Image: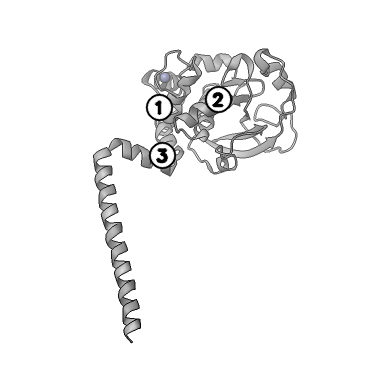
Amino acid sequence: MDKLAIRLIFMGEFPAELHIKGFKKWDSQLFQIKDIQEYPLNLDPDWDDWAYSDALLESNLPSFATSNNTISRTPTEKIDINIYVLNKPIQDNYYSRIINNNRVVLTYYQVVELLKKNMIPLDNFLIYHIYLYALVYLIKKGKEMTMEDEKYLLHKDCRGCLFDYSIYKNEVIFKCRWLEICGECKYKLITRGVSPIIIESIPAEFRQRTKPCYEKIILLLKKHPINSFGLSFIIAILTSVIASCIYGCFIQSNRSCCNM
Ligand SMILES: [Zn+2]
């Protein structure tokens, strides 16, 4: 299977902890980030609570070619899904919405604080949604995706699954820490023609690539507190022994110099 080609378009300002350029290096069996664009978001909100409606975004976001849409401005590389990333509220306070021409709008609004508080890298939220929409795209077999297609895959109860609906925003942390796909969702995907190999590869791929080093260390400390304490104790002893040796050598060499 050819990897799906994804373009990320960042609209507006984002916290420095979001590694925008770093997404280009992301590689998956399922998709490839082909292009990253950044634009200012010069739009006045038109929806309740200062949010942006689908209609406003559909007609005002920068447009690019996709595999089933020939409307083209630069760059013209063939792309399957365009994902627009915002940091402002969108219609009905959703995390993400599918608009027209296989374009997805995703927002970090109210998510940044939740992720930071729970020590989850901000990048995870975007990567999670790329997997989600890549799978929606696969079940549509390249035809135009709609919100109804996404709703078909989502379940309202929170299982820590890629397809949790997450009615409450704070539930986002359960799926962005460890991306899993529950048995029911695996079955649904397979019956719609998605390869079981791809499905099985997703959680491992996500886990392997999204955890930064510091989080791995913290998780290790939490998992093995007694061993960690013992290891810290041994390191402290070794450090003081090495420091004493260095100090001893330094004093001795100084004394030898003085005696000469
Ligand atoms: Zn599920």
Q: Nearer the viewer, mark 2 or mark 1?
A: 1
The x and y percentages for residue 185 are 42, 20
Structural crowding at the residue carrying mark 3, measured as other residues with C-alpha within 10 Å and reported as few (<14), some (14–19) or many (≥20):
some
Distance between mark 3 and mark 2 Cα atoms = 32 Å
Instruction: Name the amino acid, label 3.
Output: Glu
| Residue shown at 33% from the left, 40% from the top | 220
Residue 114 is marked as none
The x and y percentages for residue 22 are 56, 43
| Residue shown at 32% from the left, 67% from the top | 247
The x and y percentages for residue 186 are 40, 22
* Residue that carries the numbered disc 2 in the rendered image: 137
Distance between mark 3 and mark 1 Cα atoms = 18 Å
Q: Nearer the viewer, mark 3 or mark 1?
A: 3
> Taking 151 as reference, is 258 left or right?
left
| Residue shown at 66% from the left, 20% from the top | 100
State the image quarter where residue 189 is shown.
top left
* Residue that carries the numbered disc 1 in the rendered image: 180
Is 203 or 198 nearer to us in this picture?
203
Is 163 or 211 nearer to us in this picture?
211
| Residue shown at 69% from the left, 31% from the top | 65
* Residue that carries the numbered disc 3 in the rendered image: 215
Asked whether mark 3 and ligand 1 are closer than 8 Å, the reply comes as: no
